Amino acid sequence: MPDLTITLLQARQVWEDKPANLRHYESLLADCGPTDLILLPEMFHTGFSSAAERMADSFADSPGLDWLRTAAARANAAFYTSIMVRDDGRFYNRGVFVTPGGATQCYDKRMTFGLAGEDRIFTAGTRETIVMYRGWRVQLQICYDLRFPEISRNRIESDGQPAYDLLLYTANWPARRALHWRSLLPARAIENQCWVAAVNRVGEDGNGLSYSGDSMIVDAQGRVAAMAPPEEAIITYTISRTALDDVRTALPFLKDRQDHRRQHFH
């Protein structure tokens, strides 16, 4: 399997101003070099807002999604982020993985953030999404999902391979809980024997919350391979398939877990 180059766009977001955010991302993307996958922060063109009635796109006709498809084609790279959408009369914080050819796969955030009232506005998703991209199996996650290891638990599938190789997070994670972010991302990488790529925002939002970024890429041993400074930054790093396979071969923890489950639950 080929290696995969990932770019994290750690950006300031303009509060509830879609055109301004899109213009800003375009200026940042102009400085990006060749890459396979670009991550943008959660609710990329609105910020983490609760004003769903006013700000949500119709998913059937989403200018934000159209912009991502155009950007993916131009960059010849996939994009992953989330958008606030209205679909079938409900609101969702919806992750969208858009390929250069325009194909889109979706993941609805499963763990809605009760502390901010997200659970009262947005409908929680009910299933995982794993996409195949350039030879990699990629699990999609959004922000608060990070606190719940049970919903991202890797496993050995019927073909003998782990369910996924790369775990993605798009987030608006406040600076006051940055220690949790920096601790949990390596934990997810270790327990799932996968690469983790996570992008956060910087600056201050319309609710007065500050964000320190800490966007990072973590290897399957839990080592931080690349990390952004606490300011706007573009981080590009190539993750190694060989390094991942070597860890899984030397430390067959996922297989041991699968065998243990068979012995005790069947």
Image (cartoon, grey):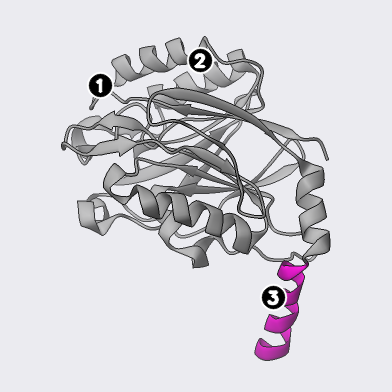
**Taking 238 as reference, is 119 left or right?**
left
Q: Quadrant of the N terminus?
A: top right
Label 3 crowd (10 A; few <14 / some 14-19 / many >=20): some
Camera-near label (1 vs 2) is: 2
Q: Is residue 82 left or right of residue 234?
A: left
| Residue 145 shows in the view | yes
Q: Which residue is mark 2?
A: 29
Relative to 211, is 222 above or below?
below
Quadrant of the rendered image containing residue 76: top right
Q: Give the residue at x 32% y 53%.
A: 123
Label 3 sits on residue: 257
Most common SS among magenta residues: helix
Q: Which residues are magenta?
A: 252-266
Q: Position of residue 4 (x, y in %)?
A: 71, 34
Q: Is residue 166 magenta?
A: no
The residue identified by callout 1 is 17
Quarter of the view holding residue 83: top left
Q: Report if residue 159 is visible in the image.
A: no
- The Cα–Cα distance between marks 1 and 2, rounded to whole angstroms, is 18 Å
Instruction: Look at the numbered discs 2 and 3 and tell me whether their residues touch, using CB distance below 8 Å.
Output: no
Secondary structure of residue under mark 2? helix
> In 3D space, how far apart are the residues under numbered discs 3 and 1 (Cα atoms)?
46 Å
Q: Compute the Cα span from label 2 to label 3.
A: 41 Å
